Amino acid sequence: MANEKVYYATGRRKSSTARVFLKPGTGKLTINGKPADQYLKTLSGKCSIQVPFTTTDTKGRFDAFVTVSGGGTTGQAEAIRHGLSRALMVADEALRAPLKKAGLLTRDSRKVERKKYGLHGARRRPQYSKR
């Protein structure tokens, strides 16, 4: 058990960061010490983190231990998906092609635009009045 290979990768989305540790196993997913189904409440989040495994046909071959912080539930789920994709690529370089084709290795760089002074939000202007 001491010589078991562990693969590590980091995934990011918005302000969420996920550290993913993969090791050969039975397909158990643990997020912040809880089972994935218990941690992620939404169906879209649960489905999102399974995409890298279904794309590469490696479902049930790896156990994943994930620590995720920052952001909301959707951002965290997407960060986990990104981290799982990168960790699978580290585990087996042959999986790079299907992951790249599915767009799972590209980091989504979109973030919330900052609020500017004189405006109500990032771009929302005060209502115009002629007089």
Image (spheres, rainbow, N blue to C red):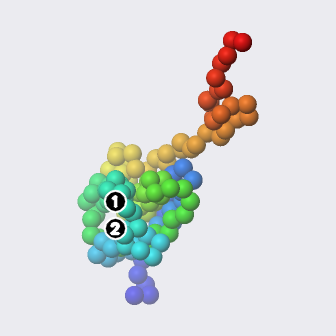
The quadrant the C terminus occupies is top right
Judging depth in this view, the residue of 86 and 128 nearest the camera is 128
Q: Amino acid at mark 1?
A: Lys
Q: Residues within 10 Å of mark 2 (few under 14, many from 20)?
A: some
Total marks placed: 2
Image coordinates for residue 33, horizontal then vertical, percent: 45, 76
Q: Tell me the SS state at disc 2.
A: helix
Which residue lies under the disc numbered 2?
Answer: 37
Residue 101 appears in the rendering: yes
Task: Give the label on residue 12, or none.
Answer: none
Determine whether, in the image, residue 43 is placed left or right of residue 13. left
Quadrant of res 53: bottom left
Q: Is residue 85 above or below residue 129?
A: below
Q: Tell me the SS state at disc 1.
A: helix
Q: CA distance from mark 1 to mark 2?
A: 7 Å
The quadrant the N terminus occupies is bottom left
Judging depth in this view, the residue of 74 and 86 nearest the camera is 74
Q: Is residue 71 above or below residue 103?
A: below
Quadrant of res 35: bottom left
Judging depth in this view, the residue of 75 and 63 nearest the camera is 75
Q: Amino acid at mark 2?
A: Asp
Q: Are circles 1 and 2 on residues that touch, CB within 8 Å? A: yes
Image coordinates for residue 13, horizontal then vertical, percent: 51, 52
Residue under the image location 41 percent in, 67 percent down = 39
Which residue lies under the disc numbered 1?
Answer: 46
Residue reaching furthest to the bottom = 1
Image coordinates for residue 34, horizontal then vertical, percent: 41, 74
Nearest to N terminus: mark 1 or mark 2: 2
Residue under the image location 35 percent in, 45 percent down = 101
